[in-house]
């Protein structure tokens, strides 16, 4: 695997089934709204060997009409929603700050958890998203400093390992002031 850290970050490697799923979801969502990928998949993208059942997407809030079009197109593309609601009910869930889950028809894993921005950190991730190219296809991910601080905030062993992995990979380019600011807002210490 080759990674070139720049703008955009370039990742050249053979695509996994999870990567192909993510790229298919991105192709759908980006037609309707800006989005950002956050959480565990970001570390997997950069080569951390760990499993995940879902990929977390934060998408800009859209009108109900626009979401209904996206929902219909998702079904035409071979996706289904794991929540029992119809498209209108899914939109209501998003408005109530809940996530909805989408997977390939007949499958449960992997799935995309899609949500509208729920807080300052989701909004910041969306507004400050950074581009990455995965085998020539552009995707947008959360700023690395925010990703590290948020993983430390979540606090599980897996989250701490994710934070450390990202820190080690990007330590020459990390904006320490931004990392410390996010950590302070989340009331966590950065131990490295």
Image (tube, grey):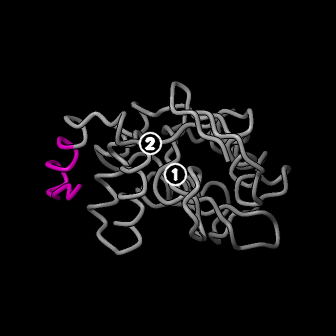
Q: Position of residue 107 (x, y in %)?
A: 77, 72
Determine which quarter of the picture holds residue 174. top left
Determine which quarter of the picture holds residue 135. top right
- Which residue in the protein does label 1 denote? 42
Asked if residue 139 is positioned above or below residue 55 in the image, the reply reads: above
* Marks 2 and 1 in Cβ contact (< 8 Å): yes
Q: Which residues are magenta?
A: 180-192
- Which residue in the protein does label 2 denote? 142
Residue pictured at 16% horizontal, 48% vertical: 185
Q: How many marks?
A: 2
Q: Which mark is residue 58?
A: none
Residue pictured at 47% horizontal, 50% vertical: 38
Residue pictured at 31% horizontal, 45% vertical: 121
> Around disc 2, counting alpha carbons within 10 Å, would you say few (fewer than 14), some (14 to 19), or many (20 or more)?
many
Q: Is residue 67 visible?
A: yes
Q: Position of residue 99 (x, y in %)?
A: 50, 60
> Around disc 1, counting alpha carbons within 10 Å, would you say few (fewer than 14), some (14 to 19), or many (20 or more)?
many
Q: Secondary structure at mark 1?
A: helix
């Amino acid at each position: 695997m080759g990674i070139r850290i720049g703008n955009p970050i370039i990742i050249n490697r053979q695509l996994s089934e999870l990567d192909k799923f993510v790229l298919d979801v991105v192709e759908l969502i980006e037609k309707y709204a800006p989005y950002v990928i956050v959480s565990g998949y970001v570390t997997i993208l950069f080569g951390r060997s760990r499993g995940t059942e879902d990929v977390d997407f934060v998408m800009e809030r859209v009108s109900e009409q626009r979401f209904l079009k996206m929902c219909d197109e998702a079904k035409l593309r071979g996706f289904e929603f794991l929540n029992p609601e119809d498209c209108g009910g899914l939109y209501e869930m998003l408005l109530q700050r809940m996530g909805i889950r989408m997977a390939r028809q007949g499958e449960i894993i992997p799935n995309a958890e899609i949500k509208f921005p729920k807080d300052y950190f989701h909004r910041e991730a969306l507004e400050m998203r950074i581009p990455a190219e995965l085998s020539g296809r552009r995707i947008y991910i959360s700023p690395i400093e925010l990703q590290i601080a948020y993983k430390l905030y979540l606090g599980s062993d897996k989250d701490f390992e994710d934070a450390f992995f990202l820190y080690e990979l990007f330590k020459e380019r990390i904006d320490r002031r931004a990392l410390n600011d996010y950590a302070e807002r989340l009331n966590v210490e950065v131990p490295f």
